[in-house]
Every structure is written in C-alpha cells, then in structure tokens.
Image: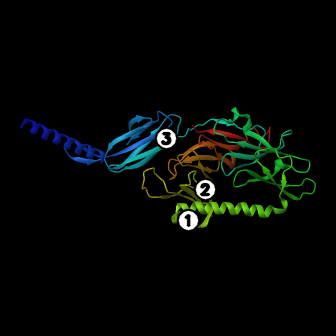
C-alpha cells in the first residue's frame, strides 16, 4: 500500500512539474498573489560593448543582455555610452514572445583618415560597392585609378590602389566622366579628344593597366542604353520579389536603393521625398512589412553594416538613422561633396571626398570616417 501511495505521489509530482514547465515555456509566470500572468522578453544585442541598457529610464545592465519577465505592453528602451550618440525607442512586448533588438551606436566625434593624397576627380562607386574609380591629375600619376574597398585597412595593402589607364597627349582620361558596368568589371570613360575637341569614349578593364583601351565612341548610345536597361530589369525583379505594395510605392520613383539583402528598398520620389518599404522590420517571424516616410535629405543610401541603417546627407551634415527614420545621429559636419559619399563594404566606415587644403590641390581627397 505504501509503495502504491509513493508511486502515485511521484506521478503527481512529475505531472505538476511538467505542467509548471509547460506554463513557463509558454511565457507565463506566477505572481506573489498566486496569479498566472503572461510575460515576454526583450533580447538586446548592442555594439559597442559595455553600452548601458535602460528600461523605462532605469539602468538594467551593460552590453548584450536579456530583459526578462516583462508584462505585455510598451517599454522605453535606451542605450547609451560616452562619446556615442544615444539610441532610444518604444518597444512593445508580446506575451510569450522574445523581441530581439540589434542596436549599434555611432561615435559622436569619429576619426578621419586620408585614403588618397593626390586629389581625386569625379569619384564613382561600383555597383557591387567594393571599388571607387576616379581621375588623378598630378604629374607622373595622371590618369584613372581604382581604389579597392577591402575589409582590412587599405594602407596595409599596396594592391588596393591601382592605375587602370594613363593620360596621353590626345586624351586627358583624368578629366573624364566615369560610369561603371553593372557587373563592376568595366569603367566607361567619356572624354574629349584634345586635338579635335570631339567627344570620345573608351571601355576600361578595371583589373589592369589598359595600354590600348577599347574605343567605343561609335556605339556609346547603344552601350548606355544596354546598361540602363540592365539596371531597370534588375530593379524590376527586386521590386517584384518585395511584393505589390513595394511596386505601388515605386510607381513614380526617381531612384531605387535596395538593402544589401534586398529585404528593403528606399524609394526616392520625383518630388525629392523618400519612403522605406521594409519586409523584415524585425527578425521575429511573421512581422508585417512596414512603410516609413524618411526625414527630408538631399541624398540617401544604405550603410552596409548588417543592421540596415540609412545614411542621410543634408547640406553639410552626414547622419545615420534606423530604417524607420528614428534615432537620427549626426556623425560628420563639413563642406564635402554630397555626390561622393559611400559606405565601406564591411560596415565599419564611410568614405567621402573632402578638401582640407585647397591651396595645395584644388581637388578633394578621399577620407574614411571610422564608425566603430
């Protein structure tokens, strides 16, 4: 009889334990009053390390952390660190769900490093975002050069900067209009013959020094149309993959800018306004796409850091912000070329054309802004 009672008690114990574990796993907790309430978790992944995490203005932890046992509702999350612009947003906690936040703070006074020293003319970023072509007009270096934007610091590798064509008596390549092929393998150079002043165009292989560049003057219109059609086709396919809502938003676009993983697009309208359509505003599965109107700026592009930040260029200021337009942080203010600002491929830096000594050279140089 005692054995039977003991067996029954053991079974009851494990049934109760299993029930409690099931309740715990479904996101419910027992209060001191004995009531079962649903809870959620905010999972914070933050860069840089040791950033302070605040929940409703109360300091909770430093660095990556889980904010647990939160009742469903809206909470104010703030992340801060000395010398960095703070981040703050209202986050809704859902019962039984983990809400992941991947947050990156940007330095308020980032360091500036020179990437070129001889002046650059008309720098152009390749479609793959990994190379910049430009002209150099200094004696002994005149021509077109390509800078590889490699993940490691460029000044540790002498192969990152190479000349692809040199000026001749007839052609000043260094003073030309440049454009890239869609595959980022060729540079189209549109210039003038110094003798006749007639337009002349060449197709340059970006991987080597072109001693006899291909003259494509006779088919320049055909080539430009072909490249333009390629861009339209690629953009159309990407929009189709994003769905009908994205296609409708892009009905009157001036420019389409797709995120690195093609999960979001910035649609710059003909009136200069811009909206973001984001199919993955949150890593939680099942979250609906979000459309956001961006703050007014002269130029937008994606910061390729894996967190879908947007760079906004307005007058003499460069800012970064979240995909939904919030947490806009100014990272650089100066008199720079707004058409020559690019993201470093590994998401650690921006690179821009800036002239800090116009008496030495009327052309700007390329500088990197370290945002780690």
Q: Report whether 186 appears left or right of 81.
A: right
Q: How far across and how far down the image is residue 219, in percent?
A: 81, 62
Q: Report whether 12 appears left or right of 275.
A: left
Q: Which mark is residue 261?
A: none
Q: Which mark is residue 86?
A: 3
Q: How far across and how far down the image is residue 185, in percent?
A: 73, 50
First in sequence: mark 3 vs mark 2: 3
- Badge 2 marks a residue whose secondary structure is strand
Q: Which mark is residue 247?
A: 1
Q: Residues under labels 3 and 2: Cα distance? A: 27 Å
Q: How far across and how far down the image is residue 284, in percent?
A: 42, 51
Q: Name the mark nearer the viewer: 3 or 2.
A: 2
Residue drawn where x is 23% and y is 47% of the image = 36
| Count of marks, rendered view | 3
Residue 269 shows in this picture: no
* The one of 354 and 163 positioned closer to us in this rendering: 163
* The one of 179 and 270 positioned closer to us in this rendering: 179
Q: Name the residue tied to disc 2.
A: 257
Q: Residues under labels 3 and 1: Cα distance? A: 35 Å
Residue drawn where x is 44% and y is 37% of the image = 64
Question: Vertical placement of 52 versus 76: above or below?
Answer: above
């Amino acid at each position: 009889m005692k054995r039977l009672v003991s067996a029954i008690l053991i079974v009851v114990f494990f049934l109760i334990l299993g029930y409690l574990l099931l309740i715990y796993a479904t996101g419910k907790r027992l209060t001191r009053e004995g009531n079962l309430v649903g809870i959620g978790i905010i999972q914070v992944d933050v860069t840089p390390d040791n950033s302070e995490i605040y929940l409703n203005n109360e300091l909770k932890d430093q660095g990556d952390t889980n904010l647990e046992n939160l009742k469903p509702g809206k909470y104010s999350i703030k992340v801060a660190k000395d010398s960095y612009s703070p981040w703050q947003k209202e986050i809704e906690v859902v019962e039984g769900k983990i809400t992941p936040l991947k947050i990156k703070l940007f330095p308020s006074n980032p360091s500036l490093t020179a990437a070129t020293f001889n002046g650059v003319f008309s720098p152009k970023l390749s479609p793959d975002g990994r190379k910049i072509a430009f002209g150099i007009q200094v004696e002994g270096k005149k021509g077109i050069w390509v800078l590889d934007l490699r993940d490691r610091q460029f000044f540790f590798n002498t192969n990152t900067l190479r000349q692809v064509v040199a000026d001749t008596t007839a052609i000043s390549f260094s003073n030309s209009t440049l454009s890239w092929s869609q595959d980022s393998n060729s540079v189209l150079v549109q210039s003038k013959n110094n003798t006749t002043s007639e337009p002349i165009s060449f197709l340059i292989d970006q991987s080597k020094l072109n001693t006899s560049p291909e003259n494509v003057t006779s088919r320049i219109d055909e080539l430009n149309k072909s490249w333009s059609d390629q861009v339209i086709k690629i953009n159309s396919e990407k929009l189709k993959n994003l769905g009908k809502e994205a296609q409708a938003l892009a009905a009157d676009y001036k420019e389409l800018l797709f995120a690195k993983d093609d999960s979001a697009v910035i649609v710059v309208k003909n009136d200069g306004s811009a909206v973001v359509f984001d199919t993955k505003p949150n890593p939680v599965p099942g979250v609906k796409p979000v459309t956001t109107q961006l703050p007014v700026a002269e130029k937008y592009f994606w910061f390729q850091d894996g967190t879908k930040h947007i760079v906004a260029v307005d007058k003499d200021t460069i800012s970064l912000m979240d995909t939904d337009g919030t947490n806009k942080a100014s990272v650089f203010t100066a008199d720079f070329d707004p058409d020559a600002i690019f993201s470093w491929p590994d998401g650690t830096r921006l690179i821009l054309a800036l002239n800090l000594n116009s008496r030495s050279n009327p052309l700007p140089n390329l500088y990197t802004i370290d945002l780690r």
